[in-house]
């Protein structure tokens, strides 16, 4: 087992942003690792394995630092129900993507990835423009719509699940700190289903390379402990700006990756 | 007193209101304080990390 310091640092930085701005671990780190010369089977399942643990850890500590209140006590509170809904839709999306892969349905990858990149970019821009007059009433139907849209995108293999769900929660009137906590835990559960899918695929002869796992897990885990504390301490007005700006960056990075 | 507790509970039960309440009622320095219970949980998480890394070292 070897710890690659540069990978530890990258995983730490991207997971810090993922657990505090609700997006970026998959969308940002995956293309960077490909650029460093790693293969999809060295990157995708490992990111899912790491995100399964770090997402749940971040969710637990967001709850501990009171950015959110998850509870299984009946009646189950709204925050837990929203998290379960988002996670449920994400899990269905993973199953849809496995179905598409299994039946070898060919989709125009560049077109759908461009569509998601533009969607994330526009959502980030709208988030920035509407900073001052954002509605704070919770609108559950709008949230369901965005969750379904994010799930559909993930299901067809276009990614961008975190940014769309995160911005969707904010547009639906959820407080930024709480939205981050909800999406962190939801992504943890979605990643568990992702890992299970990959293990299923690997049982059919596809070999997963675990060389990056210790490094990504180390950086990601430390970030998952620190980020919820950072979210608690820093004022919400900072996250209100950081989140849409980061979404804009994610959209631009995806477009650059596709067309450069 | 009971009404006050009841209204506080309603406040906490609404989405994101516990985070909003903390932001409103505490300064940054007050929010920086970590409860000893939270520190214990962080310690437990680090122990979990070490155990996982040992498992990786043994099997990878």
Image (spheres, coloured by chain):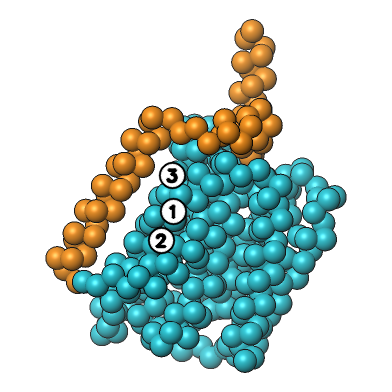
Chain colours: A cyan, B orange
The chain containing the residue under callout 1 comes to: A
The residue pinned by badge 3 equals A60
The picture quadrant where one finds residue A243 is bottom right
Label 1 packing within 10 angstroms: few (<14), some (14-19), many (20+): many
Which residue is tagged 1? A224
Q: Is residue B33 above or below residue A190?
A: above
What chain does mark 2 sit on? A
| Residue at (14% x, 65% y) in the render | B58
The reply to whether residue A51 is visible in this rendering is no
Q: Quadrant of the C terminus of chain A?
A: bottom right
Question: Which residue is situated farthest in the top direction here?
Answer: B1
Q: Residue at x 72, y 65 (%)?
A: A124
Tell us which disc is closer to us: 1 or 3: 1
Left/right placement of residue A219 relative to residue B54 reads right
- 3 or 2: mark nearer the eye: 2
Q: Earlier in the sequence, mark 1 or mark 3?
A: 3
In the rendered image, the quadrant that contains the N terminus of chain A is bottom left
Q: Nearer the viewer, residue A128 or A149?
A: A128
Depicted A191 relative to depicted A233: above or below: below
Q: Are marks 3 and 2 on the same chain?
A: yes
Chain letter, disc 3 residue: A
Residue A108, picture quadrant: bottom right
Q: Which residue is mark 2?
A: A220
Could one spot residue A203 in this view of the protein?
Answer: yes
Task: Give percent across and percent down for residue A257.
Answer: 59, 85
Q: Is residue A212 above or below residue B53?
A: below
């Amino acid at each position: 087992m070897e710890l690659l310091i540069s990978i530890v640092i990258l995983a730490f930085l991207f997971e810090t942003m993922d657990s505090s701005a609700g997006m970026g671990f998959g969308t940002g780190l995956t293309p960077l690792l490909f650029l460093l010369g790693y293969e999809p089977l060295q990157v995708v399942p490992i990111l899912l394995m790491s995100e399964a643990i770090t997402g749940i850890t971040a969710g637990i500590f967001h709850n501990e630092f009171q950015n959110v209140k998850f509870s299984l006590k009946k009646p189950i509170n709204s925050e837990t129900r929203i998290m379960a809904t988002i996670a449920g839709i994400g899990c269905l999306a993973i199953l849809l993507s496995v179905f598409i892969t299994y039946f070898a349905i060919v989709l125009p990858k560049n077109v759908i990835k461009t569509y998601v990149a533009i969607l994330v970019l526009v959502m980030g821009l709208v988030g920035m423009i509407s900073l001052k007059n954002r509605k704070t009433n919770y609108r559950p139907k709008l949230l369901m719509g965005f969750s379904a849209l994010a799930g559909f995108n993930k299901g067809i293999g276009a990614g961008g699940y975190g940014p769309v769900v995160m911005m969707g929660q904010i547009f639906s009137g959820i407080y930024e700190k709480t939205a981050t906590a909800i999406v962190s835990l939801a992504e943890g559960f979605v990643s568990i289903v992702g890992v299970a899918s990959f293990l299923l695929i690997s049982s059919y002869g596809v070999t997963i390379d675990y060389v990056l796992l210790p490094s990504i897990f180390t950086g990601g885990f430390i970030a998952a402990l620190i980020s919820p504390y950072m979210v608690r301490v820093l004022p919400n007005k900072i996250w209100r700006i950081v989140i849409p700006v980061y979404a804009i960056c994610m959209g631009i990075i995806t477009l650059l990756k596709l067309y450069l | 007193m009971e009404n006050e507790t009841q209204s506080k509970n309603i406040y906490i039960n609404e989405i994101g209101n516990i985070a909003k309440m903390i932001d409103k009622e505490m300064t940054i320095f007050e929010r920086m304080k970590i409860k000893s219970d939270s520190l214990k949980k962080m310690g437990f998480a680090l122990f979990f990390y070490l155990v996982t890394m040992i498992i990786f070292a043994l099997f990878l």
